[in-house]
Amino acid sequence: MLLVAGVGYGTELKADGSGQALSVFVSRGWAVAINGSSEIDMQSVGARWSRRWRPVGKGWLHGNPTLSVELIPYMDFDQDPRASAPALNLVYEHRFSPAAKVHPILRAGAGILYASSDVPPGETHLNFSLLLGLGLDIDLSQRWQLAPEYRFHHVSNANTGPINPGINAHTLILGLTLKMR
């Protein structure tokens, strides 16, 4: 399980939820190799830039489409041997109920990382990631927002190595965003 806490700010976020946001985050948790051979502790530090567009859709699909880029200059895998990796993720987010105080969120994304040693051990330095998350943006005030999320995160070499065992993480995320108007 991975726990992430983040702080950031938004610029010119409008009443309809559109605008830009910048966040920073740290994480710590664990993942399991798909073949069950090992548990791997993970931690990271990163930043996310997001662009939210005006709401689209009708009924329960009404919400802000959002595109985010996550730059993670430091991701550490506590395995034998230890590995660190920079990572880059491109994430699509749909933020439902833009006018409400609680906004359900659906996230899906993909990324790439290049580790200092094989992840998991005996595999490749180059890995790819897929992620799928469900969360909430909870308005605490006009300036503060709490953002709990569950995220499934898969990391593997996408069959670029001799075998492809991969790593799966069930992730709990807790973010805190400061919106600057």
Image (cartoon, rainbow, N blue to C red):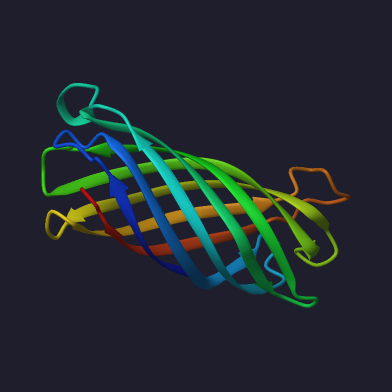
Residue in the foreground of this view, choosing between 43 and 10: 10
The image position of residue 181, as x and y in percent, is 20, 48
Q: Residue at x 75, y 48 (%)?
A: 157
Q: In this view, does 63 lie to the left or right of 115?
A: left
Q: How many marks?
A: 0
The answer to whether 112 is drawn above or below residue 14 in the figure is below
Q: Is residue 104 left or right of residue 4?
A: left
Q: Is residue 70 left or right of residue 54?
A: right
Residue in the foreground of this view, choosing between 34 and 99: 99
Q: Which residue is drawn at 83% across and 43% down?
A: 160
Does residue 1 appear in this view? no
The answer to whether 108 is drawn above or below residue 170 in the figure is above
The image position of residue 120, as x and y in percent, is 75, 64
Q: Residue at x 35, y 49 (%)?
A: 134
Q: In which quarter of the image is residue 25?
A: bottom left
The answer to whether 85 is drawn above or below residue 58 in the figure is below
The answer to whether 72 is drawn above or below residue 84 in the figure is above
The image position of residue 13, as x and y in percent, is 23, 40
Residue in the foreground of this view, choosing between 163 and 44: 44
Q: In which quarter of the image is residue 115?
A: bottom right
Q: Which residue is drawn at 56% across and 67% down?
A: 44
Does residue 38 appear in this view? yes
